[in-house]
Image: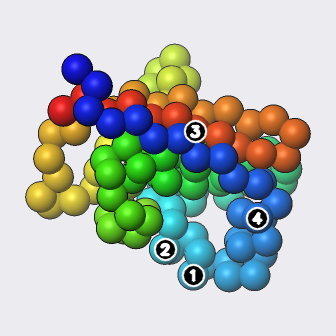
Amino acid sequence: MINGIGIDLISVDKIKKAIEMRGEKFYARVFSESESDIIEKIKSRNEKRAFEKAAGYFAAKEAFLKALGKGLFSIPLNKIKISNDESGKPYISLDLSSADNISAKVSITHDKGFACAVVIINL
């Protein structure tokens, strides 16, 4: 049973500017340690792809909060972790001591300077 659907679209340039202006403060507020490591690893090979990845993570987190019916930052964004399974399929986990068992499906895409994510919540 579907309990919530969320979608978010964000400009990759908006995330790029935020990272360039705020650097570590932005990373610490928005991304988990493993997400930050992945973004920086990609950045060393392909800066454009790294900013797309960062924007995709951000969009997925916002879409997740929308699917839950929560406002932005009602759960700290760095506590919402976007990972990939062995096949590359993204999934969401929460890094909270009181995390409920939430089943979420997520899809992330990037095209023409934008990142988009859709999240479906099954409670």
**Pointer 4 residue:** 14
Looking at the image, tell me whether mark 4 or mark 3 is earlier in sequence order: 4
Looking at the image, tell me whether mark 1 or mark 4 is earlier in sequence order: 4
Identify the secondary structure beneath mark 4. Answer: helix
Residue found 84% across the figure and 46% down from its top: 113
Q: Tag 1: residue type?
A: Lys
**Pointer 2 residue:** 29
Discs 1/4, front: 4
Q: Are marks 3 and 2 in contact (CB under 8 Å)?
A: no
Q: Label 3: few (<14), some or many (≥20) within 10 Å?
A: many
The location of residue 81, given as percent across then percent down, is 41, 50
Residue found 22% across the figure and 38% down from its top: 102
**Pointer 1 residue:** 25
Discs 1/3, front: 3
The location of residue 19, given as percent across then percent down, is 71, 71
The location of residue 91, given as percent across then percent down, is 42, 33
Q: Is residue 63 visible?
A: yes
